[in-house]
Amino acid sequence: MVTKYDVFEIIYENKTSMKATRIARELNKNKPELKKIYRILNELKKENILSKTKKGFSVKTSEKTKSLYDLIFYCVRNNINYNFLLDKNIVKFINEALKKEEFGQKDIKINPKTFKKYVGILDKNGLLLISSRKPLRARIFYNTLINNLLIYFGFTHKPRREYNINYLDEIKKELALYKQLRKKNEVGYRKIVNEFEIKFVQHSLSLEGNPITLPDTVKILKDKIIPRDLKSEDVDEVKNYQNAILKMLKDAQTDNRLTKEEILEYHRLAMFHKPKIAGIVRKESVHIHANLNFKIAKVSEIDSKFENLIEKYNNFLDQKKSSIEEIINFSSYFHNEFQYIHPFEDGNSRTTRLITFHLLHSKGIPMLDIPFGLLDEYLSYTKGSKKRNDKKLFENLQKTILFNLKKINERLD
């Protein structure tokens, strides 16, 4: 069913005046829906979003229309149905939920069916973490999309209070359940891995500026179709990163430990489209373009710090038993220390995520993806941070790990 946002997007993207018949044709709608499209066009005109001329309807240039299109584009890029989120009622719900550290049905005055619907939409799109089903307790992930939705619908947002995150007990319970369920359904688990792996490719590379959307990533990696108008280097980057991920998952599955040589191989695979630097330790100083405050090891320090990190990694794996807290704590340190060493000219962050995922897998924790709603937070605690903060990454990893476990267990149960 055509919506006003579908109509607006078509007109905005065409950058010209359009009549209802053409809009219906481009939306693949038949004649019976023409009346509805006419009605929508006039509604958008009343809302001061469109203007009407003899040639048809066109978008009014304003901050409001640009903000609306940016929201729609952001959703499309991340395979989110914008018609569900571009609704003042659900945004009001989000605004109320954000005021709580965690929220349940009793915390928000709303019809139970509507509450369930909104939670389902946010959960499906990786914008929410459900820590408990009975009774339901959840936390909204605050990110760019949520922030811009609040602004668009006129909600005055105040900076969130900082809460201390502790999901260790929940992770322990979900991990025990995961081991039971996977033992019964290894085939089902492998299917989940394949699905999550494609999302991780797009999520991870989006943090590095790759413009390819999630739907197009699925076409490239699953359907083996190259969409038109994509740069070959961007496509190669997607394919190469998948190869590196597949090797990482295989190595973790067969208990192959990380070595300097293995890490160089992951980088070589991931950066195969840049053969002059792929798998080669840098010999020159570099910096993170978007964050000049981020401290990086000097060239003269790389070898010694790299070897020292591998030694600490092996010592940690040699421990007979490690608590959930110890595993996540060391993973946070391992991630940030490797990113600080920054051994390559490019591709350091994507390699850091690979080896951190490998470490968690080797300790029995299935880390398959960083959910969409946590990408901004993850970035702000890693290469986007003004100074290193292992504690904040430790908290972010807890949410990410619990999200992965919940999704895997729901599918396997």
Image: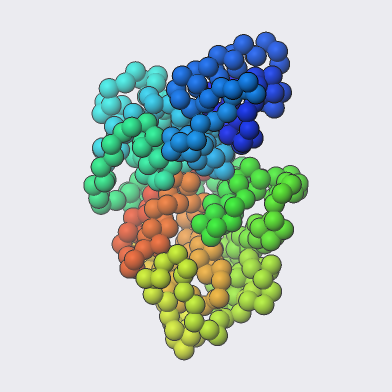
Q: Residue furthest front?
A: 54
In the rendered image, residue 264, in percent from the top left (x then y), is placed at 60, 75
In the rendered image, residue 55, in percent from the top left (x then y), is placed at 65, 23
Determine the image quadrant of residue 58.
Answer: top right
What residue lies at 61% left-to-right and 79% top-to-bottom?
Answer: 280
Determine the image quadrant of residue 15.
Answer: top right
Q: Nearer the viewer, residue 348 or 19?
A: 19
Assign the N terminus to one quadrant of the image. top right
Q: Is residue 214 above or below residue 277?
A: above
What residue lies at 50% left-to-right and 62% top-to-bottom?
Answer: 353
In the rendered image, residue 107, in percent from the top left (x then y), is placed at 26, 28
Q: Is residue 231 above or below residue 183?
A: below
Determine the image quadrant of residue 29.
Answer: top right
Task: Give the number of marks.
Answer: 0
Q: Nearer the viewer, residue 56 or 160?
A: 56
**62 on left or right of 242:** left
What residue lies at 62% left-to-right and 50% top-to-bottom?
Answer: 212
Q: Nearer the viewer, residue 276 or 369?
A: 276
Q: Residue furthest right?
A: 225
What residue lies at 66% left-to-right and 45% top-to-bottom?
Answer: 216
**141 on left or right of 71:** left
**317 on left or right of 243:** left
Residue 246 appearing in the image = no
